[in-house]
């Protein structure tokens, strides 16, 4: 005598019935309030949490907290160190988030940890199983996640976007961002714009097509896709939503079909103008002789409507780019003199101040000492004044196999790289983690093959100065005046944070987490975290005390690609931890 | 043997049911662990939350006396006629991960067979919960040389495991005077997380639905279920076609297959 399903009647099975991509109904954590779209919009001014990448969706990496300040910083000391554990270390490039007394941080190999922010005890851990054939360009790093409602959302090296339940680390939904075997991967933190989660994709060295996507943050449903290379068609709710640019306007022949332009870093969201500003990477291949033209919208900031994925405006930093000067650096919104502006320190060595309502150039100046590829930026046209220092065309060589070699600055690792600069609302200055490196560069013929490097270039990186590579530099974005610099022997590869305590925080590969005076650059405090810092710090307030957290763990692109520079830093040991500080 | 409180309780229930139910009472039920394992009190607490329990030989757990391959120990659980079964939990007292599988038979027979990994000699138990909330527990001692849970999966050493991840092969056949037998295999490493440097990676949920999409059965599986696991289930004869199997692993990878 078989009855109907007892379990169904009990309601148990109903609660886990799944639809579409939803993996599991979110576990009931209704006691803890989830993160709302307003929480995220207001993140920069609320000091009790950090619920967005950039410590505010405008990406200023600024905190109004001043409990820790230039007067009392001497007593700043670790409250605890949390180990990411395991046998896996490598680069720790994340920016943590904090909400309701819980820290959410990603680690190398796509691990995610939820940590009690007061005690440093682990609440849960998620370990993503990575396939063998992933093709990340620059170490098995991850730069962080986004919080929305009861979800922690992050991208993986095998090109998935995964939403975990903040209560227990279980997968709630996930979405595919591309074929990892063709070179797609994801290392950047997604952002939340209104009720959507926005993420790009990496893989420009493999001839993928850059794609920015907006998903319903709650359900993971794809809302829109915006290809970053002209000729490709975007979508909105599954229907075509217009071509990016105009076919063959700035790309010859068919090369746009494998044109790169990967938006591999994180963008920013400006609620004031309701605009997403996202940087795009190099056009593919590196060999620019194959693709005469500006090659839009590679090496640009694209301003995108969060509801439709339409491009409102763009600004291209390096037309017909030939040096791997990705335009992926954060475009940070700030206001000055009643104007809505945005700042962008580009890999090409120049700092740009834009009008963020229309993308028009306001100011541009070099933030590195050496920029031999271009002497300046033409403030009228926004285009670089090139010096003619492009690698030679292989077709001009005797055997057609290798073009003439140039030695050029900056290197392809950039005047700066993925790491976020900070803006102080008190000093009005931007604090840029800059690097002085050069490279030998040459071009070779190349044809596209799925999953194979599509570069057509060879290179070797070298230092420029004997005494330093990295430098934290403070600039006035309106005048271009360099207010101070703090030199560092190794290249800087971590994010910067400014606070109302007249402090600027940043980490070094040598392991030091440092605080300098925001007006003068005078070093006020440092602590060695035991391994190189390539992550981004945050600060928040809890129980009346101000806390500061920074991931520590050496790795990422420099040791892999650094050539002569890598030799200088090979003595730095690996680590994998989150160090949290407070005053004692 | 004196009749304890629990048995009196059952006597009351069964005597109020049909004659068949009353006949069932001749099967041995006891409150003392027939396997005489020192771990019983612990697993009673961790696996069954100290809920009411009776050892009942009608819950048949068939495992070999000795595990020839600790990575692949065949086990079958069949619950005799003790009424409607809401849930069956399968666990091994002395495994480092005790919980093996929870099975909600729903509209199908209270039978399941599969393979699992064993670390050392252990009782292997199944607990079947009847509608009155009582767990009927059966079990068998499994002798094993061990190591099944701390060894890496075979596929974790292969370059292409991701190509076949979640693939399902299945067969449904009818048998004379018996329920139809459904057997399916899912490609999955089922890593326990106890092998050095390899995170836990395992199928968490499987749901069997009929062609209308109605749920027939529900399986929650855990790390000890064997790599590329087989499952066998019994279904009412000649009733089902176009069954679908859906589910996911702990990384959110989907399983979705119309069974042939």
Image (tube, helix red, strand yellow):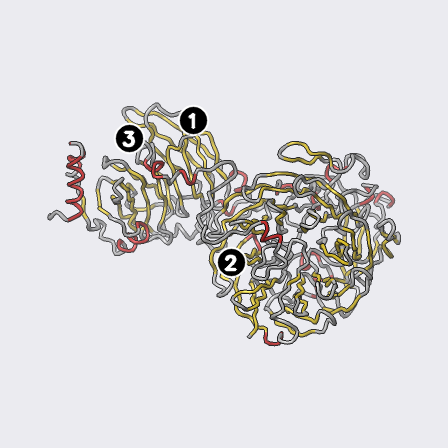
Element class at badge 1: loop
- Would residue A180 be seen by someone viewing this image from the given angle? yes
Observer-side mark, 2 or 3, equals 2
In this rendering, the answer to whether A66 lies above or below A11 is: below
Residue nearest the viewer, comparing B237 with B116: B237
Residues tagged by mark 3 and mark 1 found on one chain of the structure: no
Whole-Å distance between the Cαs marked 1 and 2? Answer: 45 Å
- Would residue A456 be seen by someone viewing this image from the given angle? no
Identify the residue position indicated by label 1 in the image.
B211
Element class at badge 3: loop
Identify the residue position indicated by label 2 in the image.
A100
Whole-Å distance between the Cαs marked 2 and 3? Answer: 48 Å
For the residue carrying disc 1, how many other residues have a C-alpha within 10 Å: few (<14), some (14-19), or many (20+)? few
Extreme residue toward the left, this view: B2
Chain ID of residue with mark 3:
A
Whole-Å distance between the Cαs marked 3 and 1? Answer: 19 Å
Mark sitting on residue A2: 3
**Residue A40 located left or right of residue A242:** left
């Amino acid at each position: 005598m078989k009855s109907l399903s007892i379990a169904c009647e009990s309601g148990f099975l109903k609660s886990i019935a799944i639809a579409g991509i939803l993996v599991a109904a979110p576990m009931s954590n209704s006691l803890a309030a989830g993160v709302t779209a307003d929480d995220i919009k207001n993140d920069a001014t609320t000091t009790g949490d950090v619920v967005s990448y950039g410590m505010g969706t405008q990406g200023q990496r600024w905190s109004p907290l001043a409990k820790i300040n230039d007067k009392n910083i001497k007593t700043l000391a670790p409250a605890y160190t949390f180990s990411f554990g395991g046998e896996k270390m490598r680069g720790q490039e994340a920016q943590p988030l904090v909400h309701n007394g819980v820290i959410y941080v990603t680690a190398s190999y796509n691990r995610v940890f939820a940590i009690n922010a007061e005690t440093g005890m682990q609440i849960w851990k998620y370990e993503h199983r990575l396939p063998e054939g992933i093709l990340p360009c620059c170490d098995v790093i991850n730069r962080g996640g986004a919080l929305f409602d009861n979800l922690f959302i992050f991208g993986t090296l095998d090109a998935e976007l995964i939403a975990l339940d903040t209560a227990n680390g279980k997968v709630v939904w996930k979405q595919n961002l591309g074929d990892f075997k063709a070179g797609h991967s994801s290392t950047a933190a997604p952002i939340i714009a209104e009720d959507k989660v926005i993420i790009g994709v990496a893989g420009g060295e493999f001839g993928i097509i850059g794609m920015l996507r907006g998903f319903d943050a709650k359900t993971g449903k794809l809302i829109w896709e915006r290809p970053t290379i002209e000729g490709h068609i975007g979508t909105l709710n599954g229907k075509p939503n217009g071509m990016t640019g105009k076919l063959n306007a700035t790309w010859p022949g068919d090369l746009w079909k494998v044109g790169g332009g990967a938006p591999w870093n994180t963008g920013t969201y400006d609620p004031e103008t309701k605009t997403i500003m996202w940087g795009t990477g190099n056009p593919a291949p590196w060999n620019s002789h194959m693709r005469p033209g500006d090659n839009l919208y590679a090496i640009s900031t694209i301003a995108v409507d969060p509801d439709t994925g339409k491009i409102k405006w763009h600004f291209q930093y390096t037309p017909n780019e030939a040096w791997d000067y990705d335009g992926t650096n954060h475009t940070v919104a700030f206001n000055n003199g009643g104007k809505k502006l945005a700042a962008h320190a580009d890999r090409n060595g120049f700092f740009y101040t834009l009008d963020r309502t229309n993308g028009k150039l306001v100011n541009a100046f070099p933030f590195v000492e050496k920029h031999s590829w271009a002497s300046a930026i033409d403030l009228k046209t926004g285009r670089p004044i090139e010096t003619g220092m492009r690698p030679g065309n292989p077709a001009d060589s005797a055997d057609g196999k290798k073009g003439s070699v140039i030695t050029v600055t900056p290197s392809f690792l950039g005047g700066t790289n993925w790491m976020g600069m900070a803006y102080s609302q008190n000093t009005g200055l931007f604090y840029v983690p800059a690097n002085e490196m050069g490279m030998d560069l040459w071009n070779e013929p190349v044809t596209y093959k799925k999953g194979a490097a599509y570069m057509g270039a060879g290179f070797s990186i070298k230092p420029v100065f004997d005494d330093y590579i990295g430098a934290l530099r403070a600039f006035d974005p309106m005048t271009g005046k360099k207010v101070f610099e703090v030199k560092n022997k190794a290249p800087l590869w971590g994010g910067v944070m400014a606070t109302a305590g007249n402090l600027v925080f940043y980490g070094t590969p040598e392991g030091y987490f440092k605080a300098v005076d925001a007006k003068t650059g005078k070093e006020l405090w440092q602590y060695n975290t035991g391994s190189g810092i390539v992550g981004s710090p945050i600060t928040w307030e809890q129980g009346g005390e101000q806390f500061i957290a920074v991931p520590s763990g050496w790795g990422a692109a420099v040791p892999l690609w650094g050539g002569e520079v890598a030799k200088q830093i090979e003595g730095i040991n690996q680590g994998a931890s989150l160090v949290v500080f407070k005053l004692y | 043997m004196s009749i304890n409180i629990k048995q009196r309780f059952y006597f009351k229930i069964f005597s109020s049911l049909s004659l068949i139910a009353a006949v069932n009472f001749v099967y041995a039920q006891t409150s003392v662990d027939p396997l005489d394992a020192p771990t019983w009190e612990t697993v009673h607490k961790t696996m069954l939350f100290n809920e009411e329990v009776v050892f009942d030989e009608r819950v048949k757990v068939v495992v070999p006396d000795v595990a020839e391959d600790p990575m692949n120990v065949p086990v079958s659980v069949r619950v005799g006629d003790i009424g409607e079964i809401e849930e069956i939990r399968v666990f091994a007292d002395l495994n480092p991960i005790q919980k093996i599988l929870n099975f909600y038979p729903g509209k199908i027979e209270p039978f399941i067979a599969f393979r699992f990994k064993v670390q050392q000699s252990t009782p292997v138990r199944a607990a079947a919960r009847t509608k009155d909330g009582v767990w009927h527990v059966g079990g068998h001692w499994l002798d094993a040389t061990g190591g099944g849970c701390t060894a890496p999966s075979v596929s974790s050493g292969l370059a292409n495991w991701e190509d076949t991840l979640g693939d399902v092969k299945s067969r449904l056949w009818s048998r004379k005077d018996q329920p139809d037998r459904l057997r399916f295999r899912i490609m999955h490493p089922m890593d326990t997380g106890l092998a050095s440097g390899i995170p836990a990676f395992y199928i968490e949920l499987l749901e069997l639905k009929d062609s209308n999409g109605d749920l027939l059965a529900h399986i929650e599986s855990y790390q000890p279920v064997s790599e590329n696991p087989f499952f066998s289930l019994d279904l009412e004869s000649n009733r089902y076609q176009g069954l679908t199997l859906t589910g996911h692993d702990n990384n959110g990878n989907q399983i979705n297959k119309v069974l042939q």
